[in-house]
């Protein structure tokens, strides 16, 4: 038998290990050393714009979680769109000049946002006055849509930069990691600079201008470096236009929704306006749809919630009452309630806790908060309670960050701390917001207080949509309130407010039961956001 010979093919070059795939292009584009710094600047600018945008809309819409959810969600949507389009564009034309031109346009547009937004934001004021909820939220959407152009273009940067920097597949992970690290480091800086430096020192509009100016300058230098002369000329024109428009724009942040604007400023915590409406000076914070202090040189009472802190001792049963000598106001604002307590009880001294020192300055300048019996403490309210051993006859809580009460001031643990700082038979008074028909927030805070205090009462305020909740540590009743009020002198401001409470305040006691907020679970934002959404729906249906 013949041996069969099996022929085998000679080794082929096609079976040899392939070299790393080289990223090539049919065209030759200039190299640039500024791609890395550009990635860092774009990361800083994208987050900085988002935070500055929150301060831009806060004077008109507030800073609720509803607003933040819209702002963050749409910003992420724009970035996602930018990643997708930018990646495709980079593959088709990996030219750094294209990238620099895109970032120049993004920067210029970002610098103009506060100016372009003015007429849209003005619509929100008109809509609020007409209770046109659809137009109100439509203007919010319109403002956030202004971010679409710059943020989408900024989304181009990361995939574009990776494409420009990638030379072979072996270095793909290293290259993309470096680019993402640069972008993230920039984002970290962009999250702190506006909050800690730009907005407190220069304001919201200037923060947009600084961020966009930095990015626009870097883009222009990059275009010059890569000899994109025509694009550089366009970028320079955009820079000149941005500077000119900002210089010509009005200095005021927003017009007053009510009365005449006397003064406005931005602090670390708030956008602040002082308004004049007839004989009254009003303190408006942030979106301005709630008034935080009122001062009328011709009369002490306002008809608002501040007046009702004075009637808290009237609920105590006869024989348990004592002179009111000390009070604590958590949320001093312009000092309206503090001044009224002093007018009602001449022997009293008031400790006023306010977290924003700029608000205190304005209170002293515009709201006659100059009485030496008012001691101002710049601190967080709960922190102050935990670090003081003082006790008080009356403790008032009026610490809104509109539209929310800080959750830490609504819990069973907090009210336990309040009770520990009350004198025997003292009273705590909490100002709670509501609508004409929606008492959900009032109900849950009332039930939380009732879990701590043996007696809790509610008084609905006539002039504003507020309910005052009063908790006492001694036997108390509505009958005692009525009896004690009847024995007051006719010229007493306490008797006047008590009369309002009895005639139109829906004065009532709170029974035990219902949801109780705790430090572990106090969804104040959830309750308030439900109220906002329901109010919007009801407004649309009217």
Image (tube, rainbow, N blue to C red):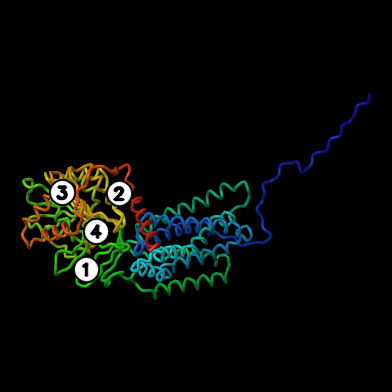
Q: Circle 1 is placed at which residue position?
A: 281
Cα separation between marks 3 and 2: 21 Å
Snapshot quadrant of residue 61: bottom left
Q: Circle 3 is placed at which residue position?
A: 427
Looking at the image, tell me whether mark 3 or mark 4 is earlier in sequence order: 4
Picture coordinates of residue 9 (x, y %)? 83, 38
Snapshot quadrant of residue 415: top left
- Is label 3 or label 2 in front? 3
Picture coordinates of residue 256 (x, y %)? 30, 70
Please give left or right for residue 441 compared with residue 191 in the image.
left
Tag 3 near tag 4, CB within 8 Å:
no
At mark 4, the secondary structure is helix
Determine which of the numbered discs, if any, sits on residue 407 in the image.
2
Determine which of the numbered discs, if any, sits on residue 194 in the image.
none
Cα separation between marks 3 and 4: 27 Å
Q: Quadrant of the N terminus?
A: top right
At mark 2, the secondary structure is helix
Q: Which of 356 and 167 is in front in this view?
A: 356
- Is label 4 or label 1 in front? 1
Looking at the image, tell me whether mark 3 or mark 2 is earlier in sequence order: 2
Q: Circle 4 is placed at which residue position?
A: 357
At mark 1, the secondary structure is strand
Cα separation between marks 2 and 1: 29 Å
Picture coordinates of residue 301 (x, y %)? 15, 63
Picture coordinates of residue 163 (x, y %)? 59, 55
- Is label 3 or label 1 in front? 3
Q: Which of 357 and 272 is in front in this view?
A: 272
Cα separation between marks 3 and 1: 29 Å
């Amino acid at each position: 038998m013949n041996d069969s010979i099996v022929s085998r093919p000679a080794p082929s070059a096609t079976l040899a290990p392939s070299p790393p795939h080289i990223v090539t292009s049919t065209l030759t584009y200039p190299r640039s050393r500024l791609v890395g710094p550009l990635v860092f600047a774009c990361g800083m600018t994208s987050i900085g714009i988002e935070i500055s945008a929150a301060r831009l809309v806060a004077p008109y819409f507030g800073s609720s979680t509803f607003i933040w959810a819209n702002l963050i969600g749409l910003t992420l949507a724009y970035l996602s769109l930018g990643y997708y389009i930018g990646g495709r564009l980079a593959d088709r034309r990996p030219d750094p000049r294209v990238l620099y031109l895109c970032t120049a346009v993004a920067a210029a547009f970002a610098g103009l946002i506060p100016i372009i937004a003015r007429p849209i934001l003005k619509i929100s004021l008109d809509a609020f006055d007409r209770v046109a909820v659809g137009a109100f939220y439509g203007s919010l959407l319109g403002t956030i849509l202004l971010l679409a152009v710059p943020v989408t273009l900024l989304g181009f940067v990361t995939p574009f930069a990776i494409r420009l920097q990638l030379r072979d597949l072996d270095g793909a992970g290293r290259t993309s990691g470096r680019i993402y690290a640069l972008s993230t480091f920039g984002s970290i800086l962009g999250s702190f600079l506006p909050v800690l430096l730009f907005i407190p020192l220069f304001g919201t509009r200037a923060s947009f201008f600084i961020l966009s100016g930095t990015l626009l300058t870097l883009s222009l230098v990059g275009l010059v470096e890569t000899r994109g002369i025509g694009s550089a000329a366009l970028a320079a024109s955009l820079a000149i236009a941005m500077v000119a428009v900002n210089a010509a724009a009005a200095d005021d942040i927003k017009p007053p929704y009510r009365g005449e604007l006397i003064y406005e400023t931005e602090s670390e915590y708030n956008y602040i306006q002082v308004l004049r409406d007839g004989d009254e000076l009003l303190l408006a914070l942030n979106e301005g749809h709630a008034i935080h202090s009122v001062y009328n040189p011709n009369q002490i009472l306002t008809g608002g919630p501040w007046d009702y802190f004075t009637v808290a001792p009237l609920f105590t049963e006869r024989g348990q009452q004592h002179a009111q000598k000390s009070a604590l106001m958590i949320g001093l604002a312009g000092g309206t309630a503090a001044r009224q307590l002093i007018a009602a009880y001449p022997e009293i001294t008031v400790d006023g806790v306010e977290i924003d020192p700029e608000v205190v300055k304005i209170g002293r300048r515009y709201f006659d908060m100059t009485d030496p019996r008012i001691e101002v403490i710049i601190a967080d309210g709960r922190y102050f309670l935990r670090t003081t051993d003082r006790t008080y006859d009356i403790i008032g809580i009026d610490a809104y960050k509109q539209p929310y009460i800080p959750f830490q001031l609504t819990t069973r643990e907090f009210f336990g701390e309040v009770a520990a700082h009350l004198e025997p038979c003292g009273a705590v008074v909490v100002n709670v917001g509501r609508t004409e028909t929606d008492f959900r927030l009032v109900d849950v805070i009332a039930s939380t207080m009732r879990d701590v205090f043996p007696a809790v009462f509610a008084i609905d305020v006539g002039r504003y949509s507020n309910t005052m909740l009063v908790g006492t540590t001694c036997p108390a009743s509505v009958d005692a309130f009525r009896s004690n009020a009847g024995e007051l002198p006719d010229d007493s401001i306490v008797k006047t407010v008590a009369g309002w409470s009895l005639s139109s305040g829906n004065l009532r006691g709170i029974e035990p039961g219902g949801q109780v907020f705790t430090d572990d679970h106090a969804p104040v934002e959830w309750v308030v956001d439900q109220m906002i959404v329901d109010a919007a729906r009801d407004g649309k249906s009217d």
